Amino acid sequence: MSSLSDRFRQLGVQLGGESLAQRQKHAKYPIETLVDGRFQVTPVGEAFLVEKLYPLADMHGNTPLQLISPVEMLAAWAKDERVATCSTNGYAFLDTETTGLGGASGTFAFLVGVGRFEVGGFRLAQFFMRDPAEEAAMLTALDGFLDGCETIVSFNGKSFDVPLLNTRYVMQGTLSPLRSLAQLDLLHLARRLWRERLPSRTLGNLEVEILGLDRSEEDVPGWMIPQMYFDYVRSGDARPMKSVLYHNAIDILSMVTLMEIMAGMLAEPLAGENEHTLDMLAVGRLYEDLGYLDKAALIIEQTIERGLPDEHQTAAIERLGYIHKRRGDTSAALSLWWQAAADRQIYAHVELAKYYEHREKNLLEAKRWTQAALAIINAPGYPRFERQLQEPELTHRLNRLERKLARGEEVDEDEAEE
């Protein structure tokens, strides 16, 4: 398999810088004649970049281009307090366009888009590598733009964009400015928040479903971009690169507004404008996973009251019961388990059996709930696979209870949670 360097050579591109000026001189449609960009002089050469300042009042889809919601829960999700203590202009929204999806040393990031807030608006800078020989200059210019940055915000950047750029800095024999920064990757959080409601959580689908945004016809599918860049390097025709710049810019602007929406959802999950109960349920689960049990219980309780699809309602009641159990609120947990047991939920029978055996020391009542569960799973029409999973544990519990009743024994502490 040929390397990326071999492919560039096959296109007639020398990776050294000595023929760069000549190649650019003979380009049919140079990028600098097609877009409003400029050259930035660095110690290792010139870098080409396109900049635009977006006023804070600008709307991107249905959301203003600004960050105003508290971000403490985003920091808790990222497991990095620096995300919460970061100043607004300390966030850098990063997205790259590359020569392939691999992260190996042979993959180039030929376009690095990065946006930051400043006085008066949101500045988007796109560093474009007209030729592989300009990589060092591009990375040096990017380093300068990131000066003072505290947190990188991305969409799958923690796994792809940042490691790739770190590798490119190493290949150029310099330290990456990204290594010491906090990272907030919105992709994995988006999957948590919308996996039940949306079949796809790609950035493009989130733009439509969450941001209310439709891209213009100028956009280009991401999978086409690597080949488009190779075609540009071979032909010198940068006209298709305008679509790539547009694609990259929209990705970054969408990350800003998506972060604001996520921060608002997590900070005020019970706000009236949150009309989707499945989203509220996802936030409640996230609070639970992060250890905020009291708030998780409140969120899920109100979600259940507002109403969920049947299959989610049943699961939410089960989850809420376990949260109450972890919180030590036995009364609230019992109320839910009795309700679920009346609906023939096996887990509720098991929890009630545990309660009467270990808390009330009432082995007869524990046996009654276990027998009731066995009767349900052995009734005609009960799914065979679920019976095969549940019956051994229930039978084991019943046999143990009968042995204890026969001996008149108390519950062994080692069995307290069986």
Image: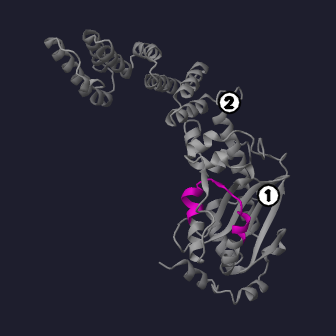
* Of marks 2 and 1, the one in the foreground: 1
Indicate left or right for 343 with 92 as reference.
left
Q: Residue at x 74, y 49 (%)?
A: 88
Q: Which residue is mark 1?
A: 123
Q: What is the x, y in percent for residue 395?
A: 22, 22
Whether residue 281 is visible here, answered yes or no, is: yes
- Image vertical order of residue 252 relative to residue 163, above or below: above
* Front-lying residue, 71 or 201: 71
Report the span colored magenta.
Answer: 141-163
Q: Which residue is mark 2?
A: 274
Q: What is the x, y in percent for residue 275?
A: 67, 28
Q: Residue at x 61, y 68 (%)?
A: 176
Q: Residue at x 47, y 16 (%)?
A: 332
The kind of residue on which mark 2 rests is: Asn
Secondary element type, mark 1? strand
Please tell me which of labels 2 and 1 falls first in the chain.
Answer: 1
Q: What is the x, y in percent for residue 105?
A: 53, 73
Q: Residue at x 13, y 13 (%)?
A: 407
- Image vertical order of residue 179 relative to residue 136, above or below: above
Q: Is residue 162 magenta?
A: yes
